[in-house]
Image (cartoon, grey):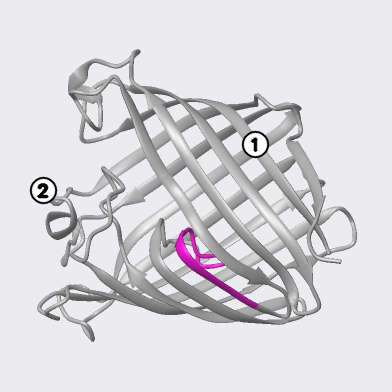
Amino acid sequence: LPMSTRATATLRQQVWAISTAPGAFVRTSVDLGVRSVLPTPAGDVFGSAAARVTGDLLSPPTKRNRPGDAAELYVWNASVGIDGPVTAEIGRFRPRMARGVSLLDGLQAGVRIDPGEIGVYGGTIPDLLTIYPTLAALTGGAYFGIDLDTGVGVLVLPRVRASVVSSPDLARQRAELDATTEVVWNGVMTLGAGARVDSGKALLGAPSLDDVELEADVTGLAPLRLSADYRYQSGPAVDFDGVIDGINPEPPAHHTSLSAHYPLLGDALEVGGVVGG
């Protein structure tokens, strides 16, 4: 059976600001990724890994995630799975079609019902500052997504997710409902919008707005890709930041960012091979 491996490297420059802090933050990074795929009758079996090397040389120590480090390594993905009529993945990854889950150490399983997919996921949330594994917060949920092809070069990609986040002792719990939609035009421009509500101070409490996000991504200047993002984030009634990574809960804030992405390996480095007879 043929097996292929694809490697990518992308230079990324980002500038962002938050309404609760003065000035702007500047960050330069290189995103590295590799993915191997083995086709089987049940679907494509894959293994993937991705990391980001971040250099904060352009930012003073007070504006770095790790003030004592000029360069930082973050492992965003290390997983194996299968992509077919039934999809599954285990390890560290960003759950597919479950927008709002930034990173998961756990597993996901879904079933494709063309042109959509429905599934579940569960696991732990890593420390989002250091990306180290932690058992401080558990999460589980269900998702549904559909890819609508309008036939005129425009894709509409709505996603819905419902989940629960809890401390291991169940002393802190929060229910979340997240809905997003992206519109992709000919692979050149992507516009997206989304919102999340949570259950406030109790698992079955009154819903409150937790997050609103708007994004725009332009690739018409290929190979350069430009993206802009706006996000409003409220101060959640049940905040897991203090449990996961010890930082103080954030007050309501407006976030804006601009990013430029340039591929260092061109389209990608691809290697093919043969496994078996």
Q: In which quarter of the image is residue 63?
A: top left
Residue 32 horizontal/vertical position (percent): 55, 36
At horizontal 14% and vertical 52% (from top left) the residue drawn is 249
The residue tagged 1 is 8
Q: Is mark 2 on a helix, strand or loop?
A: loop
Above or below: residue 8 compared with residue 209: above
Label 2 to label 1: alpha-carbon separation: 36 Å
Residue 135 horizontal/vertical position (percent): 21, 66
Above or below: residue 266 compared with residue 112: above
The magenta-colored residue range is 87-98
Quarter of the rendering occupied by the C terminus? bottom right
At horizontal 33% and vertical 14% (from top left) the residue drawn is 57
At horizontal 76% and vertical 40% (from top left) the residue drawn is 270
* Marker disc for residue 185: none
The residue tagged 2 is 248
In this image, 111 relative to 272: left or right? left
Mark 1 surroundings: few (<14), some (14-19) or many (≥20) residues within 10 A? some
Residue 108 horizontal/vertical position (percent): 50, 74
Residue type of the residue flagged with mark 1: Thr
At horizontal 32% and vertical 22% (from top left) the residue drawn is 24
Residue type of the residue flagged with mark 2: Asn
Residue 177 horizontal/vertical position (percent): 40, 74
